Every structure is written in structure tokens, then in C-alpha cells.
Image (cartoon, rainbow, N blue to C red):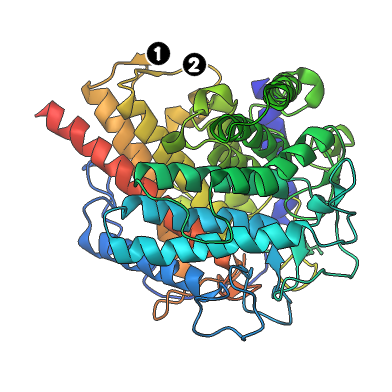
Amino acid sequence: MRITHLLLIAATVVSVHGLVLPFRVPQVTLNLGKWVTYSEDSPDDGYMNNPQFELWLETQKNRSFDLILENIGGISTSLDSNVAPGAVLASPSKSNPNYFYNWIRDSALTIRTLIYHMDDHWNEEATCLQLQEVIENYIELNFHLQRIPNRSGRFDSPDRAGLGEPKFMPDGSAFDSNWGRPQSDGPGLRVSTIANYVNVLERADRSFASEFLGNLTFVYEHIVRPDLEYVMANWENDAFDLWEEINAKHLFNSLTQLRALADGIKLAEKAGEDKEFVDALRTEFQNLKQWILHPSSGFTHLLLPYLVETPALVDQKQRSGLDAASLLAALHAHNIEYGNTGDIPFDVTDTTVLNTIGAMVADMKYRYPINHDRIRLRQNIGVGLGRYPEDVYDGYGTSEGNPWFISTASAAEVVFKWIFLTIDGKKDIEITPFNRDFLGLFTETSEESIAYGTDSFRRIVIAMFNYSDSFLDIIRSHIDDKSGAMLEQFNKYHGFMQGAEKLTWSFSSLYNCARWRLKASTMIDTVKQEAY
Ligand code: NOJ
Ligand code: NOJ
């Protein structure tokens, strides 16, 4: 198992060296590494408690939040008036590339950030009122989008085919050109986003504010239930992936659909749904879960230590299977705060998820020349990560793939969540042959079990925290310092940002990551206090 893995990495290294350009262009900002205080002598240092780094992150988190709102119809101060209220544009860019559309996936995921923010500020009335309006505009718009006939099909067909349509025009009309469709992740992502919102409303003791939406029964019956019907009717079918390129089965689609069914069961019960339908949801949940975990799905592979996003491509020897989509699946199919995590496989505590980060870093530290300087600093350091090793989309057309903000921030968020869950659960850290390649980077101990609260435990979680921060530090060094704007990617040779400008999803992933960093750092503080 190990040997195959090594061979894979070795093959990658050999093949990418040919791509390295004979010149190097300076990075976007010249302060790369300027305040990296980590040193081998002081393992407690690093980015944590570094006032400049912390200030940057806090500022960037707030700016990212504002920049998300700027891309949403009805609240934005800069978008055209024909953008429907609640339409979340992927980016304001109307050409090269044109991302001036409302994607079902991007909107469902980025609205979650607003929901998290509302949850964190539940006692600020003005913030809640404002966010409720934006979030409910989004839900109301989606009620209309669901019913628009489109090239994926119709809403009223028995399998709800029309709900697989990936994107709509900013004014809420159908997008009529060729595209990778259907994409089967949208309906499930929308269900879970609405479920998160309902949870936050309950926790904050608030109700739906919109007269149109009225109450949970309406939202469930007319918006959530059709999406659940889509998931039940379609999870066994091939569809396009989140990167809109491959018509097959994908871990991100399947895992987020599973999460939607779990959320759907709870919402259905709250809304007083018929027992028959709830039973059908339960049955499909079990069927889908069994299939995901069964070797025949191919999401795990005996010879690979990491998760496989699109097994068909591995079978056809076209891809390694490594993909940031698996990290996004782990993050978005598990929501520690809103329950259910135990039922869904491949949470961040699953070794295959950490191994996915390890293998992506092992590949991309060589693949992207921009990373070469970093890895000279130390071994256990994060690097700029792309979508998947074989990617050729450069943000405008096809040439060569680059690191993406979403991928880089997601890797960090996974590790922050891992730290949070490990400390919060007071868990010992078990080092096994299956996770040693990754966890071994952060500890010198040869123990197989690092007991909670010991010195070794404190050291390993701090080292992992610094590792997560080093991904954030890469993001810091590539974004526009003055405005906090983030595009989709940063060039693998020279580091300048490229692709769609002000990408909503880039802001959302940075925000989510910073939010989990804070939770993880509170946990680290507990461990430190317990030690003294
Ligand atoms: C646009 C899609 O959004 C992107 O994900 C994909 O890689 C390219 N088209 C491929 O051409
Ligand atoms: C291309 C990405 O591959 C896809 O995931 C995303 O939905 C669109 N861009 C819009 O951001």
C-alpha cells in the first residue's frame, strides 16, 4: 500500500519537473515569510499570537464577509438593478471569464457563511435582521428557480430533473447555452443550507421574517421536499461534478446528498411530513450510505491512502483521484454545530481525509513552482493547493492548472476542525501505519498513542495548528492587501491572482476557515492552560 503511494508521488515529481519554467517572477507581495516566527527551537511560536498575522486574518475575515454581500442582489451597493434579490453571483466578472451567474452550488455554500455569521451574532438584532432578509431572499428566489423549465429538464417531471440545472441568469431566468449539466449536487446543498438556517433560527429563537415563506411547513413542502425527491430519484445516476467537467459518480455529490437526506429527515419530521415519506428518506439514506462505503463505489481504494473523488477516472487511469473536492465534501457534509455528523462517513477525523491533504501537498509542492521556496523552510508546511493534480483550467481557458484559494483554505479548515474535535473530545491521538505519513510530520515521538493532555499531545496539536496557519499565510501573500479582494486562482509560476475576480466562494472559504481557526485556538488555549 505504502509502496504504491510512494511510486505515485515519485512519478508525479518526475513528470512535473519538466514543467518548471527556467525563470522565476517575484511574488505579488514581497513580504512573504517576513513575520514567520516559527523556529525549531520554539515550537510554541509560529503564527499563533503573532499580532500582525492575527490582525491580518481578522481584517480579511471581515472584508471577506462584506465582499460576499457585495455579490448578492438586493443588498449589494455595486451590482446592476436587474440582479434579482437573493441571487448570489459567483463573481461580478461579465467576461473573460463570464461568472455573472447564480450557480446553485456556489450560492448554497456561500449563503452558509452568512448563516454561520448570524449564528455567531445571534444577540445583535440589526445584524440578524439584515442577514435574515438576505438569506430569505435567497430561499425565496430558489423557490422560483426550482420551477423554471431549463435544459436539465422540468420541475414537474417525476424525477424532478429540472432541479439538476447548475446555474441561472442573474435576473432569475434560465441559462440556455451548452454547459456541463445536470449537476447533481445543487438540490442537496440547498436542503442542507436551509436546514442550517432553520437550526440557527431555532437557536436564536426567531422565525421566518418573509411573508412569502411564512413558516417551516411552507419552506419544507415547497422547496425542501422537491429537492429531496430529486436526491432520492437521482443519486444512482451519473451527473457532472462540482468542477463541471466530468459526467460520472463523484464523492462530493454523493456525500453532500447523503447529508441532505439526513437533514431532510429532521426537517420532514419537524414539518409534520407523512410517515411514508420519512420512511422513504430513511431507506434511501441507508442505501446511499452503504453504497458510499462499499468498495464498489471506489471512493476508497485499497491501494490508495486518500479519498477518490471520481473513481471512474482512476479506473480509466486518467487521474490520481486526488481532489480538493474531497476536502470540500468532508467540510460541507459535516456540520459539527448542527448535528448528524456521526452518521455521515468521511468527517475530518477520518484518516483518509487527512491523507488527502498529505497527498495533495506532496504532489503540489513540486507541481506548482510557486511552492518551491516554501518547502525549503521546513517539512511540515502548507503549500498553495489546486483543485486536482491533472487540472488544466487556468481561470480563463485551458492551459495549466494553478493553486486555488478555495482549495488552500479548505485544507487549513479541515485541520483546524480536526484540532477542535480532537481536543474537544479529549481524544488521545493514535498513530497508525495508515496515518503515520501525515501525523508523523508533527511529532517526534515514536509512541503509538499520544495521550490527551500530555506534553507530546500539546506539541502535536500546536504543530498542526501552525501547519494550518501556513496555508492561510500563503493566501495572505497572494491577495490584494489594500482591498482584500480574491480572485479564483493564483498563478503557479509567479503568484499573481487570476481567473474570475472577487470570487464569492473564495471569500466564503476564507471566512469559514478563519472561523474554525478561532474555535481551534480556543481549544489550544485550554490545552496550554491545563499544562501549567
Ligand atoms: C468552466 C468551469 O466552470 C470550470 O470549472 C471548468 O474547469 C472549465 N469550464 C473547463 O473549461
Ligand atoms: C468554476 C468552478 O469549477 C465551479 O465549481 C464553480 O461553481 C464555478 N466556477 C462558479 O464559481
Q: Label 1 amino acid? A: Glu
Residue 33 appears in the rendering: no
Residue 89 has which mark?
none
Say which element carries label 2: loop
Residue toward you, 484 or 213: 213
Mark 1 falls on what kind of element? loop
For the residues bearing labels 2 and 1, Cβ distance under 8 angstroms: yes
* Label of residue 448 in the image: 1
The residue that label 2 is drawn on is 432
Residue at the far left in the pictured view: 532
Q: Quadrant of residue 85?
A: bottom right
Would you say residue 434 is visible in this rendering? yes
Q: Is residue 442 left or right of residue 211?
A: left
Looking at the rendered image, the quarter that the C terminus falls into is: top left
Q: Amino acid at mark 2?
A: Thr
Image spot of residue 416 (x, y percent):
40, 41
Between 283 and 207, the residue placed more toward the observer is 207
Q: Position of residue 164 (x, y in %)?
A: 81, 51
* Number of other residues with Cα within 10 Å of mark 2, as a class: few under 14, some 14 to 19, many 20 or more: some
Among the two numbered marks 2 and 1 on one chain, the one whose residue lies closer to the N terminus: 2
